[in-house]
Amino acid sequence: MPTVSVVIATFSMKRWDDLRAAVASVQAQTVPVLETIVVIDHHPELLTKARNELPDVTVLPARGGRGASVARNTGVAASHGELVAFLDDDAVAAPRCLEALLCHFSDAGVVGVGGRLDPLWATSRPRWFPPEFDWTVGASYLGMPTSAEPVRNVWSNNMAIRRQAFDLVGGFRDDFGKVGARSRPEDTDLCLRAAGRHGGGTWIYEPAGTAGHRVPAQRATLRYFAYRCFNEGWGKAALASLNGMGESISSEREYTRRVLPTALTRGLREALRGDVSGGLRSLAIAAGFTAVMIGFLVGHLTLLIRTTGVRRARPTRITVTNEELAVGYGGHQQADAPLASSGADGP
């Protein structure tokens, strides 16, 4: 198999125990990794602790601004593997996870592969929480493929990509991605660009490559659910401005057309049979979808307003010749006096 470097980005001391578990899961893989690189996102105390307490791990500070995109790019720049795998600091890879992902790279047309993510609830799963919305907590949702299939994109909390393809597109966009707990679809953006530059290359979703993703208690609330749905819509609007509407929401259209109606119907049937939680899940699906759409519209309008404002504020420079100045000043020429005027561009 090709050599692989694993990059884990982290930003909070609160996730220290989770980070140690993530690193241990990489070291326990059935396929040995070339190196494990942990990148600390602007947290000097965490950087020192990681360097002192994580053996056989390369620990680096993020180079540049804040956010997961910058941190991951820092890790890739320091890596030496033919492939680069990413794992979140609060995820735990199953022992055969990498083995399942890497086997697909024997096909030269495969750009990258992503694995399944199972939610690891700190508390019990809320009865109202629809499994079709597990993506809100960073886990694979009901309706995704149950066997290896080509997909538009995979998720950066459990994925591997060819280093050459990653470098070819310049990695993740430094100014577009997750900062702290605020999510953005930087992984979808990377997948779209990498596939396009790789001659129409393919991304594979491999559910056999499993990892668990921790879900803290504060994310098992209706408040967080609505916030995450709204934020997803906002992020998809930004993604569409970068990559075009067609590709940016192609999977979402299929999800809306196929997955959600099935989920709503099942929930209503359960409610009619006396299962109150089925009705609650149907209400949550309707609320989540509405929040996504509101987020998308707000994000789209915000980008439109910003773009219009930048266009109107763009300065216009008018250069006037000495002869024209001479006429304007009663025939007395004034050399080296170009006229610059700031104003709104015309329609």
Image: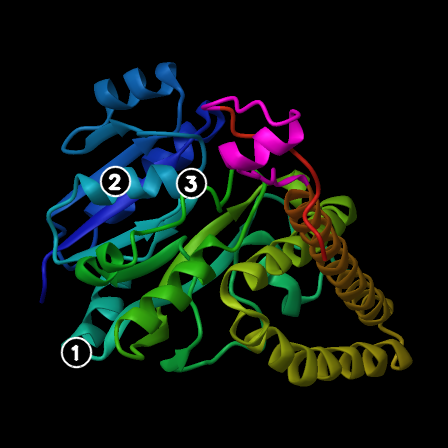
Q: Amino acid at mark 2?
A: Gly
Q: Vertical placement of 244 versus 49: above or below? A: below
Q: Tell me if I can see residue 340 in this picture.
A: no
Report the predominant secondary structure element of the magenta stretch: loop
In the rendered view, does 301 fall on the left or right side of 144? right
What residue sits right under mark 1 in the picture?
108
Does dot 2 land on a helix, a strand or a loop? helix
Disc 2 crowd, CA 10 A, few/some/many (<14, 14-19, 20+): many
Q: Residues at badges 3 and 1 in contact (C-beta under 8 Å)?
A: no
**Where residue 324 sits in the image (x, y, percent)?**
57, 37
Of residue 225 and residue 235, the one placed in the foreground of this image is 235
| Residue located 49% across and 46% down the image | 176
Mark number for residue 75?
2
Q: Amino acid at mark 3?
A: Ala
What residue sits right under mark 3 in the picture?
68
Q: Vertical placement of 69 versus 185: above or below? A: above
On whether residue 27 falls in the magenta region, the answer is: no
On whether residue 329 falls in the magenta region, the answer is: yes
In the rendered view, does 35 fall on the left or right side of 301? left
Q: Vertical placement of 125 versus 195: above or below? A: above
The N terminus sits in image quarter: bottom left
Image: magenta residue range: 313-336
Of residue 152 and residue 118, the one placed in the foreground of this image is 152
- Mark positioned earlier in the residue sequence (3 or 2): 3
Of residue 127 and residue 257, the one placed in the foreground of this image is 257
In the rendered view, does 74 fall on the left or right side of 257? left
What's the distance in space between the residues labelled 3 and 2, CA to CA?
11 Å
Q: Quadrant of residue 155?
A: bottom left
Q: Tell me if I can see residue 213 in this picture.
A: yes
